[in-house]
Amino acid sequence: MWPSPEQPDLGSFLVPLTRELEALGHEVEVASISQRGGSRSKYVRLVREARAAARRFNPDVVFAHFLFPSGAAGALAARAAGAPLVVMAHGQDVANLGRIPGVTAATRWVLHRSSAVIANSRWLASRLTEHISSAEPKIEVADCGVDLEAFSPRPAPEARRSVGWDGEGPAFLCVGSLIERKNVVRLADAFASLERGRLAFVGDGPLRGALEGRANVTMTGRLPQGDVPQWVAACDVLCQPSLIEPFGQATLEAMAMERTVVATTVGGPPEFVTPDAGVLIDPENSDAMAAALERAAAMPSPNPAAREAAASHDVKHQARKMAAVLERAT
């Protein structure tokens, strides 16, 4: 995935990683999809683009994000270039294993042709090996990291004025697609039970209609990645109480901006959210979610401990880890 003017948030987490790989002295050519939905013919176009780029660019290694179908495109590109393949699991690609007919067999084919597999959390690595045990010897854990400069601390009052988000009481923010997995309706219900503060959703999706029109709830729609930090700066607490969150990019970015977080216990967040940085909750416990919002609102804002915890996931450090995997593959 890669951002486009029509889909400015699509795959935006890969842009800083690509930039940092280039800053390390590597040349990077991108073959990508920049649209949501549409017919499956977009994957055929991706295969054609990836193979053409591989023949033209003659890479030392092909790095494919998401195990399938883009991992298959990467495998065919690697074959065209006579280069090794490294694939990265991000979450939904692992969730699809055993759920969509044919995906497990296709993913096993991709992994067999891969020199290495990167998973964005230990939790996701474990889920992958539960389905495909042969992947275990190839797995390394690294995440896409956070740009500590782009997501640097800034004063909340100025940020709130710039985005037009005024109000009294704690300011809660949720960044991500408005889908069932993100647990956005339960979050909105828990917020309503507090009867104070305000809540904003940065993102869009099929559950937007269930959130619009609620008291003290703001909907921004999808925003370019460059606009997101100002909204994070405007909040006191970033909320990502997903039913499952393989890593938790928005949570990490908010922590980098010295914002306390409320995050799920299911997935990657327990690997980097410290007790001083935020509150971890069972995402299906509505009463616990309301209590977690109250606890998080009582924590410091800004919260320097949160940025300290996020610092070890600096995108520069994560890019070096990935570059080392790619170099070993060659």
Image (cartoon, rainbow, N blue to C red):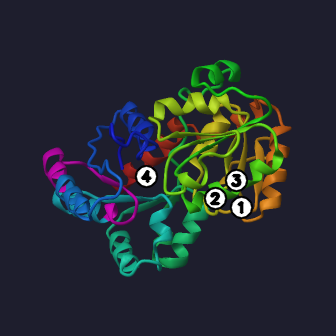
Q: Secondary structure at mark 2?
A: loop
Looking at the image, is mark 4 or mark 2 nearer the viewer? 2
Query: Mark 2 vs mark 1: which is more N-terminal?
Result: 2
Whether residue 112 is situated above or below residue 22 in the rendered picture: below
Q: Residues within 10 Å of mark 1 (few under 14, many from 20)?
A: many
Where residue 183 is drawn, which disc sits there?
2
Q: Nearer the viewer, residue 141 or 244?
A: 244
Mark 4 = which residue? 325
Whether residue 276 is situated above or below residue 205 in the rendered picture: above
Report how far apart the C-alphas of labels 1 and 4 lie in the structure.
34 Å
Q: Residues within 10 Å of mark 2 (few under 14, many from 20)?
A: many
Which corner quadrant of the image does residue 168 belong to?
top right
Report how far apart the C-alphas of labels 4 and 3 lie in the structure.
38 Å
Mark 1 = which residue? 283
Question: Which x, y percent locates residue 270?
Answer: 71, 55
Question: Which x, y percent locates residue 80?
Answer: 16, 59
Report how far apart the C-alphas of labels 3 and 2 lie in the structure.
6 Å
Looking at the image, is mark 2 or mark 1 nearer the viewer? 2
Mark 3 = which residue? 187
